Image (cartoon, rainbow, N blue to C red):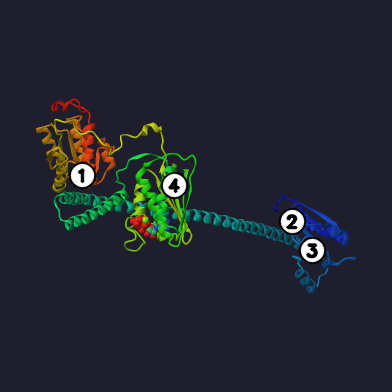
Amino acid sequence: MIDSETVIRILHLEDSDLDAELVEAALDAIGRPYAVERVMDGPAFAAAAQPGRHDLILADFVLPTFDGLGALMVAQAQCPDTPFVFVSGTLGEETAVEALKNGAVDYITKQRLERLPRTVLRALAEAQAKHDKRLAEAALQSLNDTLEIRIVERTRELAASNAALQTQIVERERVEEALRLAQRLEAVGQLTSGVAHDFNNLLTVISGNIEFLAREVTGERSQRRLALMKGAADRGANLTAQLLAFSRRQRLAPTPVSLNQTVASMRDLLQSSMGGAVRIETTLHADLWPALVDATQIELVILNLAINARDAMAVGGSLTIETANVTVKAQPTRPEEPVPGEYVMVAISDTGTGMTPDVVKRVFEPFFTTKEVGKGSGLGLAQAYGFVKQSGGGIRIDTIVGEGTSIRVYLPRVTGRMEEFAPGPMPGVAVEAPAPGREAVLLVVDDDTAVREITVTRLSEAGHVVREAGSGLAALSSLEADPRVDLVVLDFAMPGMNGAEVASEIRKRWPGMPVLFVTGYADTTALMKVGAVGTDNIVQKPFRDGELERKVASALVNRTPSGLRLVSGSAGRS
Ligand SMILES: Nc1ncnc2c1ncn2[C@@H]1O[C@H](COP(=O)(O)OP(=O)(O)OP(=O)(O)O)[C@@H](O)[C@H]1O
Ligand SMILES: [Mg+2]
């Protein structure tokens, strides 16, 4: 920065001492400090003309061994930023123009040295302006350069957050899809369980009456017709049982099960269901944890999965059943998948057709099948899904079209001590008949008259004294009027006061009075609330193979003695 205090550094090319003095005298008129480095010939000038060393160059035009234009060229080459002014005796117009063209900023004749101060100041100001401009340009350039870097960085940041956002969107869509699937299955489950419940009541009436008729009808043809009807009713009952399994309202009796044993014991059955073209291999883990599941249902599930595998291997192949202890760490991404935890796994894999993504999406829906009419009802996997979920496990499907399918079933492992699961008395074993001398009095409570009629008839035929009530309230007033009842046989789903409410009222007012639930489905949570969790005090509708009679007899034997028993006077019965 040039200011009035700064010394102006001048390189002066001049061979004449006198002229040099005249020039300096003219410079004095600037009124600012200055320092002159004087040189007299080419080599000295070339040595002195260094960038940044001077603020200004003054040069004579005609020298004995050198000339002004030569000096100008040296200056242009070595210190192009230092302003160059000719101070010369005579300078023709042409030469002057030539000089300016070549980069001199001005020229002054020695006859008019009074112009020198102004010229010097202007040259310095222009040089300063040029310098400032260059600085500004450099600053701008560097700003531009960093701007590019900043843009590149910012673009990269944006791209990264965009990618993150995309991942989030995909993840959200996946979660929403899983939720939709779960809700769909849930809705279908509610619907099916409602339908199944009503059908079970109808089937109870149908099967019961078929049974009664079969005892009365003698003709062979009529008997055959009744047998056909019975078969159809049984198939209906199987179907509703599958629907209930899907909607997770199946009655389950979880016990510790060695799945290795289950698989081993099913080998013959599986081999005969597979036919000759399918090879069966088993890989059973040696130290398999016991699973806590319903032993019969898990067999059904394995059989169902094996039959699906067989159907997918029409031309033959191999079926592999594998067991393993598995710790699941990942969160489920589909409704059927297990939540993190420890599981006993059984995997059924085939080398069959595999499934397309569209099929996989729907396999758990009841009635979804790709098989011909009559070949599949589409309930196998729905049943497996409901059962496994109700048991607290999960399922995973891995499938590749054209290569095969592997379905892994995760079941809860037994936690806690094994003794807690010591088997109770086997259902169905012969139970003691009620003590002789007095018939047991039963109160049958059911809002459905036709169903109640079947229940009452069966139990009367089994030798019990049966009272009836068409609602929970009616049952309570009947008990109030006469509490001499040995067992209440209570329908679970009734309008108004439901079975659970009636049971807890009975428990309050007549503690110790045993209750046997009859249900078209087992709403496990509600039944658990009233303490009826064992399978012994629940009878499934429609009644099968004398289950009602057996459980009634069993409840009469197992009931705890209570104040009411005094009425019966048979202290020996407990
Ligand atoms: N191992 C498998 N390989 C290829 N496709 C399969 C396999 N298991 C199931 N599927 C497909 O899933 C559909 C549904 O199976 P699911 O077991 O629920 O019903 P289904 O076998 O058709 O009838 P059901 O089991 O009631 O007799 C099948 O129709 C089939 O398309
Ligand atoms: Mg199937």
CB of mark 2 near ligand 1 (< 8 Å): no
Labels 1 and 3: the sequence-earlier one: 3
Q: Quadrant of ligand 1?
A: bottom left
SS under mark 1: loop
Q: Residue furthest left?
A: 481
Depth order, front residue of 275/72: 275
Q: Please indicate, yes or no, whether residue 392 appears anywhere in the rendered image.
A: yes
Q: Residue beneath label 4, please?
A: 346
Q: Position of residue 61 (x, y in %)?
A: 83, 66
Compute the Cα span from label 1 to label 2. Answer: 117 Å
Q: Position of residue 225 (x, y in %)?
A: 19, 57
Callout 3: 10 Å neighbours few (<14), some, many (20+)? some
Q: Are marks 2 and 3 in contact (CB under 8 Å)?
A: no
Say which amino acid is labelled 3: Ala
Which of the labelled discs sits on residue 493, or is there none?
Answer: 1
- First in residue order: circle 4 vs circle 3: 3
Residue mark closest to the camera, 4 vs 2? 4
Q: CA distance from mark 2 to mark 3?
A: 29 Å
**Distance between the Cα atoms at labels 4 and 1?**
36 Å
Question: Can you give x and y, in whole percent of width and height, for residue 423 in the image?
Answer: 34, 35
Q: Which residue is mark 3?
A: 77
Question: In the rendering, which numbered label is found on residue 167?
Answer: none
Q: CA distance from mark 4 to mark 2?
A: 104 Å
Distance between mark 4 and mark 3 Cα atoms: 89 Å
Looking at the image, tell me whether mark 4 or mark 2 is earlier in sequence order: 2
Q: Mark number for residue 30? A: 2
Q: Amino acid at mark 4?
A: Val
